[in-house]
């Protein structure tokens, strides 16, 4: 029913509660069928084996679809060009032009900004690892980027841009295709790239670096574009705090969570008690990451769940005693009961080479600051 509702454009009329009921019914149908609730006989060992084989076949087809999607090519071209990179480029360039509004920017600036937004994540990962960015290894990605850039900004009649920004089902379809790119970015282009990096062979690999590179590969382009104000809203670039770090978006949270989940499922360095790939195979672990992206995208776009990760992050914040906002002046507590109020005058003075206080004010450090009042020569 879901694809029919989406294609007809009537999915927005369905309430989140009804979507939840629909999903619950779909989940209960295999169970009811196996238990004979529809009038048939209850499941026997032979039928259970047959159903297990069926589910295994579905999992294999799902995994193979995800793995082969990395090699999809744009049809009709005499040379190989990545289809996933084309869709990602179209989406990124359309977002840039949408934020431009009625303004126009120089073509070279637009080209560079869209290139950062499209390939910035995997490029930053390559910089961390001292490698050439993967999208420059061959001509497939640059060709796909050039085609997508021309279609959004130079195509007569602006048909691709209008279709992508005015037809909701097209934008949603592109989102689901881009979820494949996100899955591969975190797994194949991110963590697996770290695991096979020649510079880390001597130290045996790094788990934190794998999680970091998986996260950056999945959402680094958007972070870099926001960091340098390359989103298209302004023509003047400037370094500032990325908004996604002040309030992490769904993409940033999903990239970090799925990168962490992928590492914990695989356990490549045997940090945990279970062995490497103890639960599922390497390829199945990749497919699980894509499945999580599909679930988050469906919840956010179709079910209108604003913060799918909010329950988990709130729970972790309470367990780790980590609030959303950190710092500020501390409140009186155990320290004051043990040592009193002495020493508060030194709170705002850093020691030599301590923290962020490299430049010292000698008078303030020695307590020689004169009281405000009548000025002296």
Image (cartoon, helix red, strand yellow):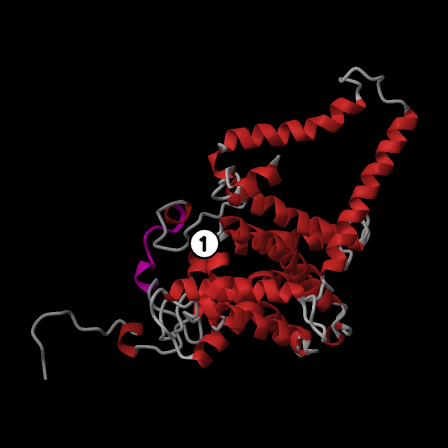
Query: In the rendered image of this protein, does residue 277 appear above or below residue 197?
Result: above
Left or right for 293, reference 237 = right
Which residue is at the front of the view, 125 or 299? 299
Q: Quadrant of residue 371?
A: bottom left
Residue name at image x 60 percent, y 30 percent: 22
User: Most extreme residue toward the front, as rendered?
Assistant: 157
Q: Secondary structure at mark 1?
A: helix
In the picture provided, is 351 more to the left or to the right than 184? Answer: left
Tell which residue pokes out farthest to the bottom in this image.
Answer: 377
Dot 1: few (<14), some (14–19), or many (≥20) neighbours within 10 Å? few
The image shows residue 120 at horizontal and vertical percentages of: 56, 70
Magenta-colored stretch includes residue 186: no
Read off the magenta span.
337-346
**Res. 307 in view:** yes
- Residue 259 as seen in the image, left or right of residue 56: left
User: Which residue matches tag 1?
Assistant: 166
Q: How many marks?
A: 1
Q: Residue 125 falls in which quadrant of the image?
A: bottom right
Please say whether residue 339 is one of the residues in the magenta stretch.
yes
Q: Position of residue 68 (x, y in %)?
A: 76, 59
Is residue 17 shown above or below 86? above
Front residue of 170 and 65 = 170
Quarter of the rendering occupied by the C terminus: bottom left
Q: Mostly what secondary structure, the magenta segment? A: helix
């Amino acid at each position: 029913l879901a694809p029919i509702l989406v294609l007809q454009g009537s999915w927005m009329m369905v309430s989140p509660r009804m979507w939840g009921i629909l999903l619950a019914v779909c989940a209960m149908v295999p169970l009811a069928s196996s238990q004979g609730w529809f009038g048939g006989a209850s499941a026997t060992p032979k039928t259970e084996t047959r159903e297990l084989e069926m589910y295994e076949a579905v999992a294999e087809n799902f995994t193979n679809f995800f793995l082969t999607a990395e090699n999809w090519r744009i049809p009709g071209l005499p040379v190989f060009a990545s289809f996933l990179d084309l869709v990602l480029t179209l989406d990124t360039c359309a977002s840039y032009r949408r934020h431009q509004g009625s303004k126009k920017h120089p073509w070279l600036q637009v080209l560079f900004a869209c290139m950062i937004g499209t390939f910035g994540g995997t490029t930053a990962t390559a910089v961390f690892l001292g490698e050439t960015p993967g999208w420059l290894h061959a001509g497939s990605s640059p060709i796909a980027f050039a085609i997508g850039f021309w279609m959004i900004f130079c195509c007569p009649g602006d048909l691709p841009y209008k279709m992508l920004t005015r037809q909701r089902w097209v934008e949603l379809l592109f989102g689901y295709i881009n979820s494949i790119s996100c899955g591969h970015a975190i797994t194949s282009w991110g963590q697996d790239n770290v695991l096979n990096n020649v510079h880390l062979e001597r130290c045996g690999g790094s788990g934190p670096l794998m999680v970091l590179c998986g996260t950056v590969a999945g959402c680094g382009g958007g972070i870099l574009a926001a960091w340098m104000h390359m989103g298209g809203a302004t023509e003047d670039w400037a370094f500032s705090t990325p908004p996604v770090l002040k309030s992490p978006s769904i993409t940033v949270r999903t990239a970090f969570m799925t990168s962490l989940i992928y590492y914990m499922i695989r356990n490549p360095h045997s940090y945990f008690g279970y062995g490497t790939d103890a639960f599922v195979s390497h390829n199945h672990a990749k497919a699980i990451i894509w499945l999580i992206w599909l679930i988050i995208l469906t919840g956010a776009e179709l079910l209108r769940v604003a913060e799918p990760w909010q329950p988990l992050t709130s729970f972790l914040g309470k367990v780790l005693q980590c609030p959303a906002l950190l710092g500020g002046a501390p409140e009186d507590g155990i320290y004051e009961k043990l040592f009193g109020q002495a020493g508060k005058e030194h709170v705002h003075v850093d020691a030599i080479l301590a923290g962020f206080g490299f430049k010292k004010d000698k008078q303030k450090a020695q307590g020689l600051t004169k009281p405000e009042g009548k000025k002296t020569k």
